Image (cartoon, rainbow, N blue to C red):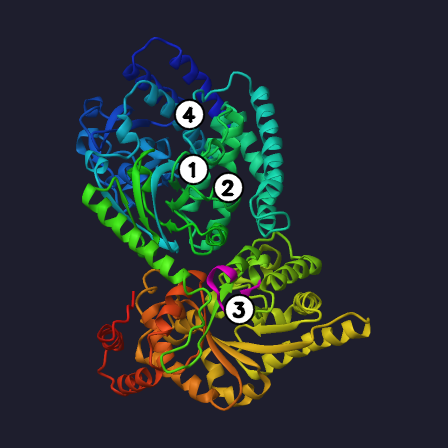
Amino acid sequence: MTAAASARQILTRLHEVMATRLHAQGKLDQVVDIIGECLSSEVCSIYLLREGMLELYATRGLDAGAVHVTRMAIGAGLTGIIAANVETLNLAEAKAHPDFQYRPETGEEKFHSFAGVPIVHRERAVGVLSVQHVEPRRYEPVEIEALQTTAMVLSELIYNAELVDEEEALGLSAAQTGPHTVSGLTLVKGLGSGIAAYHQPRVQITQVMAEDTEAERQRVYRAFDKMREQIDNLSVQAEFGVGGEHEEVLETYKMFAYDEGWSRRINEAIDSGLTAEAAIERVQQHTRMRMREIDDPLLAERMHDLEDLANRLVRIVSGQLGTAASQGLRSDTILIARNLGPAELLEYDRRRLKGVILEEGSLTAHVVIVARAMGVPVLGRATNIRGMVREGDEILLDAGAGSAVVRPSASVAEAFADRFAKSREKQAAYAQLRDVEPFTRCGTRIEVMVNAGLREDMSALAMTGADGIGLFRTEFQFLVSATLPQRERQQRLYRDVLDAAGDKPVIFRTVDIGGDKAVPYLASDTAQHDENPAMGWRALRLALTREGLMKAQARALLEAAAGRSLYVMFPMVSEPWEFDRAKVMFEDQRAFLRSKKKAVPEQVHYGAMLEVPALAEVLDLLLPKLSFLSVGTNDLTQFLFAADRANPRLAERYDWLSPSILRFLRRVVHGTVGSGVNLGVCGEMGGRRLEALALLGIGFTRLSITPAAVGPIKELVRKVDLSELSEAMTLWLASPETDVRVALSAWAEERDIETE
């Protein structure tokens, strides 16, 4: 029997039971009998969440005296594990599982096999449906799918009969209705306060079992058509304008929207007797369970994209249309979501969207790129945030500190308001420095540039008065595109960037994809085949192999910069020959354009990123070939310490002010003296005031940082005497016992230099 037929048989009989006037307990008693008979299982039991415990509510096969007596804590025993993890268990020998707990009052000692599925309400387990059998055997997939479908029907019955308390179903306890601090992962830094709003208003599925299977199928087909139309329309309606990178993000969504496997699974769920809404939700539940088993963050991110579309689809088919964006934000808002697609973030009014908190989310997510461009702080990995927060709750978000306060007390809210006000005052003071050149007290001019990656980032030049773009990440266009960006599209972006920069320089870093920036159209070359992606086939290594990719980008940059100066920087150079080959590719394209009588740049300045430590050992060979050198502190740090910066257990372990880092950087500075090569730092290190002090003290005079850091760093520069600072740094780095962070902080405090 197929999964659909098996589930349909059960649902048909359940429909008859639910139509009777029996009380809820009587219906559950009949339900376990029906499931047991249809699956030829000797035991079928239903546990429901009551007062924080899973209580045996109905059973066929276990001792009837255990009903309403046997209770399991969430996370305790097999039943508790299913509820805690919202996952399915299928065991040939239950006693062999490390979490097995024997309950003598149930009389279950003779049963060996065990399978259980969560009964889910509003994405949380409110109960467990389980079956057992004397003979050791794993249940067939057809039986598991039938159980999962049945659990959806039980969820409706349980909710309508009010067998589970609503606050328990939402995961709220009395302690969770007062002030609460939520911790998470910083995805986009910033402060924000507002009223909590769910990105996706709750879709209430009022009918689970279908009356007419074919009618439900047609409803799904129509919903798919409308969803695809919406995705297409977003390209025109999005705020970033026609031709922006958001269009390429949406291309990824389109691939999923037309995925036949996804629609086939929904159709199979409808065949089992579910309504269109229930079928989509059924497939979504399966997707969530799969996501919990995925360790690869990039693959998990693609699964989130699929769930994003499923949420849109179920809203369309149910007629409960619109996210919080389409309904309109009525006040300053902190958006709450399990995860968020970049296309949906673009729909929000950025004037009222003050922050985003995600229950999941990752540093590699496409939405982070868009949020940073919008200037919206984002906190991710906020476990159970949707269980802690209700619509309308006040939230104070400090994404930079990785925390948010929900329903703050008056004193906490007042302190946050003071901090926010001081932050705004500082920002206003920094804004006054926009047209001020950053000279140190001793008269040294420090170049302060900004990092960028989107067309919209270029507005930061005018707002901050930065000296130029010290790093333009060209890979963003590749990362958010479903296909390899055509040369013409690349050229249009680069020309727009140069036009926006005017007479200020823009350093274009050639594409850095692969590693943690895998793209589907180069899957054979990227991270999925690397055990250590950060040190794998990425950046210049990949580009030199994919010559067509590199040549197309070279020509796009050269044509875009016709008649101007072009600054090109190659990432992850490990040895001089790699730089040589990359430069030859550019020069060959330059010669080709000249042969075709096409305009070319007046000058091309070539540079390299120093992020692979090995390059420091051969700088004497490379420097004569360079116009400029930029130290990429983010990657350099993880390579020096052999510590993956994406690993949360290591992210804060190694200090940028460690003598090992600073001594290495100082050696690079000394190695470039007299070479005529412009040396700088591009990375987060240069945007932190205390770390920037250290960089100035060891000899760096060019910093490329985030736009928000430009004002603070300009203000810092004007308070520093480099000779005094350099002397102090030399002394500290010569003494292994010195804690440079402590010593530098004290030095700055004595001179009234703020370091936060």
- How much space separates mark 2 and mark 1, taking CA atoms? 9 Å
Callout 1: SS: loop
Lower sequence index among marks 4 and 3: 4
- How much space separates mark 3 and mark 1, taking CA atoms? 37 Å
Callout 2: SS: helix
Residue indicated by mark 4? 204
Classify mark 3: residues with Cα within 10 Å, few (<14), some (14-19) or many (20+): many
Q: Are marks 3 and 1 in contact (CB under 8 Å)?
A: no
Residue indicated by mark 2? 344
Q: Is residue 530 above or below residue 676?
A: above
Lower sequence index among marks 4 and 1: 1
- How much space separates mark 4 and mark 2, taking CA atoms? 21 Å
Image coordinates for residue 645, horizontal then vertical, percent:
39, 65
Which amino acid does the dot numbered 1 rest on?
His
Lower sequence index among marks 2 and 3: 2
Q: Nearer the viewer, mark 4 or mark 3?
A: 3
Lower sequence index among marks 4 and 2: 4
